Each structure stands twice: as structure tokens, then as C-alpha cells.
Amino acid sequence: MEAVKKYGSFFRLRFAMGLQYRAAALAGIVTQFAWGFLEIMVYWAFYEAEPQNFPMTFEATTAYIWLQQAFLAFFVPWMVENEIFDAILNGNVAYEMCRPVDMYWMWFSRSVANRFSRATLRCFPILIVAAFLPAPYRMMGPVCLEDLFWFLVTVALGLLVMVAFCMLIYMLAFFTVSAQGLRILFVSCVEFFSGAVIPLPFFPEGIRDVMELLPFAAMQNVPLRIYGGNLYGEELRRAVILQVFWLFVLILLGKMLEWKAVKRIVLQGG
């Protein structure tokens, strides 16, 4: 209970800080609407040409795109905290290590709050407007209440998996002179393999089967497909199990890297 209060305080402070950037959120909403319209128009052209050759209905694809924009802050890999990288680079991480808290969980709770606050400011305007747009741009409602329930559960799990993955980047930064290369590599992998560029159902079957086993598929791929009714039954249960599995694996790897980093770190020659 004491640990919950301790790390909950970091969450609340960072969440309150994130809610202050309303102008940035407004600019982001405008940008995300423009990008969402462009994506939908591209897919609409393909669906009009050959409507029978797609693994998702157009309504499900439209919902996927709008939900992707609404919860962008949850799932984009490039939304990391530069101050953490700066602290590692300039040695100010020593102050973090002196605090009577676990550094990994402190950064984890802050990262979750940072993403949650940004999504809070942006998701409701996007979802509300998208629900009242004319066809074919309108976002469909959930297929059933059960799908809505699993969507909410898997969105939360996907957020935690994404943060746990970003924690690996922070911890690996202890072992490099510059984290820029790590960030470019990891961001590129997540963007492609998580379904951020192209939804995973659009990939060839053999490639898709492999991609769905990777930790990247446990991020936005699962909840966005559940909402549109593309993921259900046994596949849904397997996807949720994989989310939980990768969450524990990524946290374990992050904690191991933290332990190694703390053992070898050198600050001001000491």
C-alpha cells in the first residue's frame, strides 16, 4: 500500500503537469483529424476498387484509424521523456538514485501519467466528432458491449506494454554514449510491427502469424481490432494472454537492465 501511494504521487504530479498543455493538445487534434481523413480516403479508394479482397470491413478500418488517432498518445513510441535521457547523459540521474524509491517504477509511473494526460486532452473531441461525421468517414460504434469491455481492458494493457517497452530504451541508454540511435531503431520497429502504418490483418498470412507473436502486436493492434469486431473468440483470448505475457517479460528485462546499469554506472569518476 505504501508503494502504491508513493508511485501514485508521481503519477498524479505528472498527470497534472500534462493537462496544462491545452494549446499543444488543440494543435494535435487538428493535425490528427487531417491525418485521419487522409488515411481514410486512401483506404476508401482501395475498397472501392476491389471491395471483396480485404481482411477487414471498411467500417472496421475507419474505426481503427479514428481510435488510432484518439489514443495516439498511448501507443506512439516516439513519445518518450527527453529529461530522462538528459539525466542519464549529464549525470543528474544520481539525484534520482538517491531518492528512497525504485528508479524503474518511478519512471514507469511518470511515463504512464504523461501519456494518459495527453490522451485525455485529445481523445474525447476526436471520438465525439468522428461519431457524427457523414459516411464514409463516420466511426462505427462497438459491435457489442462485450467488445467494448475487452477494448477498454486491452487498451490499458497495450498502454502498459508500450511504457514497459520504452523503459527498455531508457535502461539501454545507460550503456551508450548517445541514445539517438537506439530511439531511431526502436521507433521504426514499433511503428511497422505494431500496425501503426498498416493494420496487421492486411499483411500476408504467414508474415502476419509471426508478427502477432511479437511484443509490438500487443500494443495498439489488439484493442483497435477488437473494437471493430475483427478480433474475437479464441483469437481474442490468445491476444490478451500475449499482452499479459509480454508485459511481464518486458518489465523483467527492464528491471534486469536497471540492476546492471546501477552496478556499472560511473558519475564524476566515483
Image: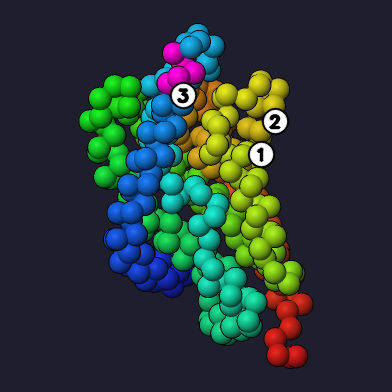
Residue that label 2 marks: 210
- Residue at figure coordinates x 29%, y 34% from the top left: 130
Q: Nearer the viewer, residue 132 or 237?
A: 132
Q: Quadrant of the N terminus?
A: bottom left
Question: Disc number at residue 270?
Answer: none
Residue that label 1 marks: 214
Secondary structure found at label 1? loop
What's under tag 1, amino acid-wise?
Answer: Leu
Name the chief secondary structure element in magenta: helix
Does residue 217 lie above or below 75 as drawn?
A: above
Q: Is residue 21 magenta?
A: no
Disc 3 and disc 1: Cα gap in Å? 26 Å
Does residue 194 lie above or below 168 as drawn?
A: above
Within 10 angstroms of label 1, few (less than 14), some, or many (20 or more) residues? some
Q: Where is residue 259, by image quadrant?
A: bottom right
Q: Nearer the viewer, residue 42 or 3?
A: 42
Q: Quadrant of the C terminus?
A: bottom right
Residue that label 3 marks: 43
Of all residues, the one furthest to the left in this rendering is 132
- Number of labels in the image equals 3
Residue 238 location in percent, x, y? 58, 30
- Residue at figure coordinates x 42%, y 71% from the top left: 10
What span is in magenta?
44-48
Residue 16 location in percent, x, y? 32, 67
What's under tag 2, amino acid-wise?
Answer: Val
Left or right: 77 in relation to 143? right
